[in-house]
Image (tube, rainbow, N blue to C red):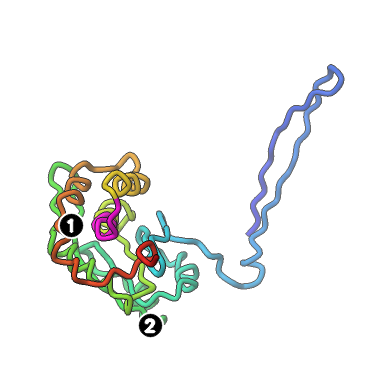
Amino acid sequence: MQVAAELQRTQYHQDTQMCRKIQLTISDHAADDGEDPFIPPLNFAMVDNGIFRSGFPEPANFSFLKTLRLRSIIYLCPEPYPEANMEFLKANGIKLFHFGIEGHKEPFVNIPEDTIREALKVVLDVRNHPVIIHCKRGKHRTGCLVGCYRKLQKWCLSSVFDEYQRFAAAKARVSDQRFVELFDISSLKHLPIPFSCLKR
């Protein structure tokens, strides 16, 4: 695939105006080599060693996901996983943990605390790493799960909310942040927390 772009640039030289048209050509070398380009899913980011987050992976993202050598995927939407995604998981030996949380808009947001707690247990188990956490857009449900284990990492709430807002942007929900703030981590404190920031 080739993309051509034209850029108009005006330069001034000795009191005369001179226009120069520059043509930029960007080549997709991966396509020339017969390989798929590495395209990360929407809102992809590394959370910690062996833990990633994103929006819903599309088939175009599969080549990129292969590079992560995933063992597990935590899927937070209630809908069944698409057949193409299931085939990708089977072909690459990836285990699916499905925690169906309904996606509601404020003021009708209802995040089940028990479901988040069970998902956190999967995140905390290093046998599931590398793992990627995703919902539809990688904003609200994913943000709540990530926010809750940041509390386990002893992050201050302002830092937890900064991270949540960085991904949710204009779609940030007060109800999500309230859920994270009130989430009780006491029942999980007995579990080992294998995060890099605690290895000092």
Q: Residue 134: x, y in percent?
A: 32, 62
How would you rate the neighbour count of disc 2 (Cα within 10 Å): few for under 14, some for 14-19, many for 20 or more? few
Q: Main secondary structure of the magenta part?
A: helix
Tell me what residue is drawn at x 36 percent, y 78 percent: 94
Asked if labels 2 and 1 touch by Cβ distance under 8 angstroms, the answer is no
For marks 1 and 2 on the same chain, the one whose residue lies earlier in the sequence: 2
Q: Quadrant of residue 101?
A: bottom left
Mark drawn on residue 150: none
Locate residue 60 relative to residue 31 in the image: left or right. Answer: left
> What are the residue bounds of the magenta stretch?
147-155
Q: Which residue lies at the image location 23% right of the left edge and 43% below the top edge? A: 173
Q: Position of residue 194 (x, y in %)?
A: 33, 70
Q: Quadrant of the C terminus?
A: bottom left
Residue 106, percent from left and from top: 17, 43
Which is more toward the observer, 77 or 119?
A: 119
What residue did someone put label 1 on?
102
Residue 155 appears at what percent x and percent y? 30, 53
Residue drawn at (75%, 40%) of the image: 22
Looking at the rendered structure, the kind of residue marked 2 is: Gly
Q: Residue furthest front?
A: 200
Checking the image for residue 93, the label placed there is 2
Q: Is residue 126 left or right of residue 12?
A: left
The image quarter in which residue 174 lies? top left
Element on which disc 2 rests: loop
Residue type, mark 1 in image: Glu
> In the structure shown, which secondary structural element does the residue marked by tag 1 occupy?
loop
